[in-house]
Image: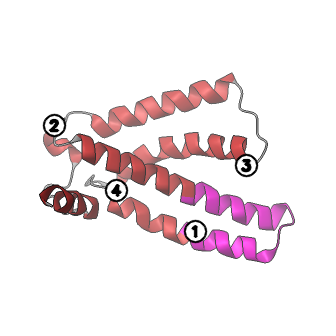
């Protein structure tokens, strides 16, 4: 394993970053649509609920440091913002957007997977996702 990271833990962590990004960008987009694009008020309310759900997702990460989790998440947020805009809002990213997003994702993956004691993971494996993966592996 890479400094404590296993393939299953990497996949789970990446899935959590994507889930967090979909909730944050999606929730923010719903609020934006309500307040700036004339959609009904309940779009904003739904977006607010999704944003509250987003707040809990990073807490499930196996990494032990708040700052590192949110720094790594930032790269995913950038890429997912562009994808959401392209897929649902008619935004056309240019080459600078694509290259910049790729650089961000490469950078945050370096931060995430950099060899460090314990891989920067919860020392006692206490993160919720790590417990769940251990239970699945034991089954």
Near mark 3 (Cα within 10 A), the count class, few <14, some 14-19 or many ≥20, is few
Quarter of the rendering occupied by the C terminus: bottom left
Q: State left or right for residue 87 relative to residue 69.
A: right
Q: Main secondary structure of the magenta part?
A: helix
Residue 125 to residue 55: above or below: above
Q: Which residue is mark 2?
A: 1
Q: Residue furthest front?
A: 139
Does label 4 or label 3 sit earlier along the sequence?
4
Which residue appears at 85% of the width and 60% of the height?
A: 37
How many numbered markers are drawn? Answer: 4
Does label 1 or label 3 sit earlier along the sequence?
1
Does label 1 or label 4 sit earlier along the sequence?
1
Q: Which residue is mark 4?
A: 66
Near mark 2 (Cα within 10 A), the count class, few <14, some 14-19 or many ≥20, is few
Measured as percent of width and height from the top left, residue 26 is found at 63, 58
- Residue 88 is marked as 3
Q: Mark 1 and mark 2: span between their CA atoms?
A: 34 Å
**Stretch of the chain drawn in magenta:** 23-51
Magenta stretch holds residue 91: no
Measured as percent of width and height from the top left, residue 32 is found at 75, 61
Q: Mark 4 and mark 2: span between their CA atoms?
A: 23 Å
Q: Mark 3 and mark 2: span between their CA atoms?
A: 38 Å
- Residue 127 is marked as none
Q: Mark 1 and mark 3: span between their CA atoms?
A: 17 Å
């Amino acid at each position: 394993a890479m400094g404590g990271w296993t393939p299953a833990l990497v996949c789970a962590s990446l899935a959590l970053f994507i889930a967090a990004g979909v909730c944050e960008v999606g929730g923010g987009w719903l609020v934006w649509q309500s307040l700036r694009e004339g959609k009904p008020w309940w779009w904003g309310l739904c977006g607010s609920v999704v944003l509250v759900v987003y707040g809990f997702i990073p807490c499930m990460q196996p990494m032990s440091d708040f700052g590192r989790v949110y720094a790594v998440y930032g790269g995913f947020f950038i890429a997912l913002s562009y994808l959401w805009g392209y897929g649902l809002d008619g935004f056309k990213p240019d080459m600078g957007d694509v290259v910049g997003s790729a650089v961000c994702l490469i950078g945050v993956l370096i931060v995430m997977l950099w060899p460090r004691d314990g891989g920067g993971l919860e020392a006692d494996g206490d993160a919720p996702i790590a417990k769940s993966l251990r239970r699945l592996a034991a089954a």
